[in-house]
Image: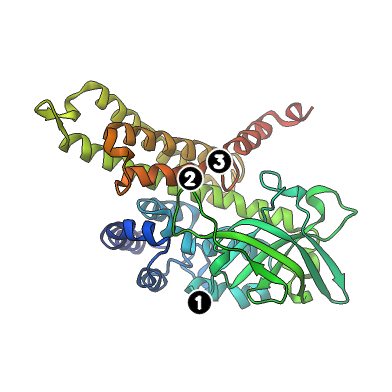
Amino acid sequence: MDPETFTQIVASVREFVRQEVVPLEQRIEADDAVPEHLRQACREMGLYGFAIPERYGGTGLSMAEEAELVFELGYTTPALRSMFGTNNGIAGHVLLEGATEEQKQAWLPRLATGELTACFALTEPEAGSDPSTLTTRAERDGDDWILHGSKRWITNAPIADLFMVFARTSREQPGARGISAFLVPAGAEGLEVGAPDHKMGQRGAWTADVHLDGVRVAGAGLIGGAAGVDRGFATAMKCLAHGRLHIAAVCVGMAQRLVDEQVAFATERRQGGRPIAAHQLIQGMVADSVTDLRAGRALVRTAAAAFDDGSDLTIGPSTAKYFCSEMVGRVADRAVQIHGGAGYMRDVPVERLYRDARLFRIYEGTSQIQQLIIARTVLGDAARE
């Protein structure tokens, strides 16, 4: 995309987020829902398909461009980005990374416009950090497959039109090697979505359990067709690498918001006749937050560039996700501390953001999983002795 057009896109999203969404954050928190007019605005702005290639109806942003856009989206409640995050991210990328051309043509244009919302059904009650241990199974029945199992904490499941379901297709192939991915439309007989989860934070971003009791999937629903059998895990890992960079950029956007909130409060709040910004210990916390923010932004930009040129598809995404998810937690903690008692009160943005930030260290691979990926990639076989 030419730089001028991209600059205009980022500017329009920045204006939309700060003028239209930020004023509604408390309503979204109270209602646990994003207003429909904001959803429609996101469709019209093309936000459901910014990471989907132009030939499938999307905007076709590079990873570096996506990161810059997501810095802006991360500035407000995570519920906004969550609405279309799965279409652009882990769900849409299942199709981009593993589907046949026919499957891409059938589904990606509808994801890009926001006509459909997709979800990524990988995590299970006993298979989270290590999804290779999943137990959802798919059994052949002629040309069809029959799915049995349960998934947990699936983002957008309550509103999903399309489920990317990962299931074990081979009992002979141990661990990751016997897993395939399937396209399951909402409303399929035997597919049941549980009640929305009641989470610590990120209200308005809906997750729920998904149960599959004898769900029949036609052979055309196997992602990748015949060549996709037992290839699902490799596809999932490629999707998660992209997703980790995306989440890192979200964390940078939230950190920017938190820095802005603590700077505004420190300069406006007066104690003993002068602003608390005059106190050196407050200055120290602000300085640490600004440093964390800038380091995170620089790391995401570097990792995104390496992702785009193919030179680093593993360590870069993991280091960015690890550092930025931990970083935004530190910045949120300082923001609450600078606000003092006010920071512990509901309806104050930093209190809500403090709760919202905590989840980033868990999903798309916990901080501990990122540590293992980074260390084992660098140390090689010695780390696996």
Q: In this view, does 123 lie above or below 275?
A: below
Res 87 → quadrant: bottom right
Residue 248 — which label?
2
Residue with the mark numbered 3: 316
Residue with the mark numbered 1: 115
Q: Does residue 79 appear anywhere in the picture?
A: yes
| 233 sits left or right of 326 in the view | right
Which residue lies at the image location 44% right of the left edge and 49% below the top edge?
A: 250
Q: Is residue 244 above or below residue 335?
A: below
Q: Is mark 1 on a helix, strand or loop?
A: loop
Q: Which of marks 2 and 3 is in front?
A: 2
Of labels 2 and 1, earlier in sequence is 1
Q: In this view, does 225 lie above or below 326?
A: below
Work out whether residue 158 or residue 381 is closer to the camera in this orientation and state it.
Answer: 158
Point out residue 383 in the picture as x, y percentages from the top left corner.
73, 28
Q: Which residue lies furthest to the right in this view?
A: 172
**Badge 2: few (under 14), some or many (20 or more) residues near its Cα, within 10 Å?**
many
Three-letter code for the amino acid on which mark 3 is drawn: Gly
Q: Quadrant of the C terminus?
A: top right
Work out whether residue 20 or residue 306 is closer to the camera in this orientation and state it.
Answer: 20
Point out residue 264 in the picture as x, y percentages from the top left corner.
21, 40
Marks 2 and 3 sit apart, C-alpha to C-alpha, by 11 Å
